[in-house]
Amino acid sequence: MQKIVFDTNFPLLPFTLGVDVYYEIRRIVQGEYKIFFPDYCLEELKKIKESSVPAALSLMSKKGVGVMTTGLVGDADPLILKMDKQDTVVCTSDKKLKQELLKKGFRVIFPRGKKKLELR
C-alpha cells in the first residue's frame, strides 16, 4: 500500500485554488493508498492565520486522513525530505520542496493548472 503524505499547505488547496485534491489523488494514483498528515505539519498548519484552516482540518477528518505520529518538531520541509521514499508519494504545492523531492527520487503530487494535480 502506498503512503500519500500531505505537506503543510496541501490541505488548503480545495479552499485556495478550488482543487478537489481527494478526487484528483484517486484519479492519478494507481493501486491502494492511505493519506497521512505528519504531526509536525499539523502543528504548522494550526499556526497559519488563514480562515480556511478549520475547514481544511474538518475535510481531512471526513476524508479519513490519518495523522502520522513522528514525535519530530521543527520546520516541515527538512523533515519531509528525511522520510523514507519507498512507497511514499509527497503532495506539495511548494515549488522549491517539489524540486528537492524530485532530486532525491521521491514521487510527488503537485498542482498543475488551476484544477488538476499531476504525479511525477
Image: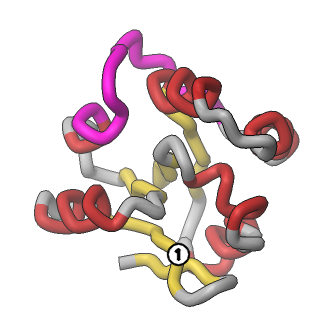
Foreground residue among 42 and 53: 53
Q: Left or right of 94: which side holds 1? A: right
Quarter location, residue 94: bottom left
Give the farthest residue toward the top: 71
Given the image, on which type of amino acid does mark 1 rest?
Answer: Pro
**Magenta-drawn segment:** 66-79
Q: Does the magenta stretch include residue 100?
A: no
Foreground residue among 78 and 65: 78
Spot occupied by residue 115 in the image (x, y as percentages of width and height): 68, 83
**Is 56 rendered above or below residue 54?**
below
Q: What element carries label 1?
A: strand
Q: How many labels does the image show?
A: 1
Residue at 60%, 47% (x, y): give it.
Answer: 34
Residue at 62%, 83% (x, y): give it.
Answer: 116
In this view of the protein, can residue 106 be seen by the observer?
A: yes
Q: Does the magenta stretch include residue 75?
A: yes
Residue at 25%, 50% (x, y): give it.
Answer: 85
Give the farthest residue toward the bottom: 113
| Quadrant containing the C terminus in the rendered view | bottom left
Give the farthest residue toward the left: 103
Residue beneath label 1, please? 111
Q: Left or right of 66: which side holds 78? A: left
Quarter location, residue 114: bottom right
**Is 98 rendered above or below residue 73?**
below
